[in-house]
Amino acid sequence: MSRKYYIFRLALVVLLTTITTITGESNMIERAKITVGIEEADIVGSDNRALQTAVDYIAGLGGGTVYIGAGTYLMKDSLHLRSNVTVIGQGESTILRKSDGFKSALATDGDYGQEEITPADSSGFEVGIGVTVTDSNSGGFHTTVATIISRDGDNFAINKPLNSDCMVARGAYAQNTFPVVSGYYIENVRIEKLTIDGNKAKNEHLNGCRGAGIFLYRAKGTLIRNCVSHDYNGDGISFQQSNDTVVENCVSYNNASLGFHPGSGSQRPTLRDNLAYDNGGDGLFLCWRVKNGIFEGNELRNNGQFGISIGHKDTDNVFRKNIVIGNKSHGVFFRNEPEYTGGHRNLLENNKILNNGTGGDGCGIYINGETHDITLINNEIGDNQPTDKKTQQYGVWIGSKANRVKIQKNKMEGNKVDTVKNDAINADVEVSD
């Protein structure tokens, strides 16, 4: 064997060993880790400041893992996630509880781009807490969620510019609402085994475009696993403009609005084996431009509106092996969109869609708007309750403007009125059950 060949082989072995170590197949390189807890931890504390210190420390080392011990942690601001940091709790015994809420009208206008607010009543605000600023005309993404960073009398500086004019004449106000856990512009983050208590009874509402128990904005490749979000005055788990998000084995219940809310251009989401129940709105709400998603093995039960809602440019998604049961309105609802923004080319297969319409007029699946290219195959869509207690009117209701709907090999039994109602008289509808 020549010396050059030997050196080449040795270099190749070193290279492969390095790659193996980096990819986690060897324990030769250990990433940074730290513990935080109420006692007997590297960082001892019982509020968001202790948790944030640990996350920021690990982020400063280039990434690693934060382990949060058992206990209840008072959250006066978000736990702000950082890129390349994993956060792991101990499940139901690691509770992040939102602080009690406070709200005040603004004493003067908050102008677009301004990084200061002046509440009429400043008694409930302090440096370091999270704050929401908005008015009656500034909902959705125009709402600003920030952190108070300094105070000068009754004037509070915040760490983000206002997203819109917040005018006293339109009822402008500030309140200390925020996501309990949030990630903005992050990559390669994992959170596991956390329980979020939103303290709904003592907080104002925050819309799901800007907050939730767990909230992501423009995140990439985030994994949320084995987490619980409950009693948040808003959504349970929401992610906006975030690609390749995976939510697995999570529970979202008793939140004021939506259980799970992928939205606003989020591409390739995966929601698998999750449970949403007793939420005030939909169990699973696809907002705008949610594409190429996989939604499988989820249970959406007893929610206050739809089990699953699909609409504005929500195309090319697969819904498989979900259980959609006992929701107040339709089990699955395609919203009323024109053709150019419809929720087209969606596949529903091997789902159980049962006993929906508990509010009085719901169906298993309602295809509204100018929605087309919907395939329903091998689903069970029915009502198995006693005759006098049935609630699900039809298995499938096809609206008058829908087109190219395929209904194949489904089991549709026991619906209160009939299996299929087709109002799309001139449409291409194939029913082959």
Image (cartoon, grey):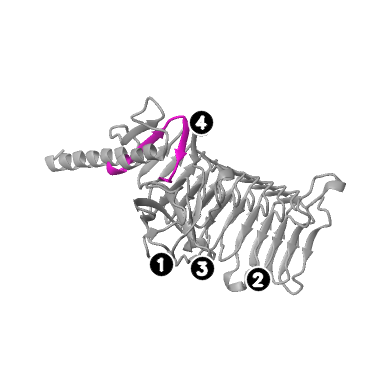
Percent x, y of residue 87 = 41, 39
C-alpha span from label 4 to label 1: 42 Å
Q: Amino acid at mark 1?
A: Tyr
Quarter holding the N terminus is top left
**Marks 2 and 4, Cα distance to the nearest angstrom?**
47 Å
Badge 4 marks a residue whose secondary structure is helix
Question: Residue tagged by mark 2?
Answer: 370
Earlier residue among tags 3 and 1: 1
Residue 93 disc label: 4
Secondary structure beneath disc 3? helix
**Disc 4 or 3, which lies upstream in sequence?**
4
Estimate the spatial distance between the alpha carbons at disc 2 and disc 1, rounded to whole Å. Answer: 37 Å
The residues bearing labels 4 and 3 have C-alpha atoms spaced at a distance of: 45 Å
Which mark is nearer the camera, 2 or 4? 4
Mark 2 or mark 3, earlier in chain: 3
Where are the magenta residues, as a range? 58-79
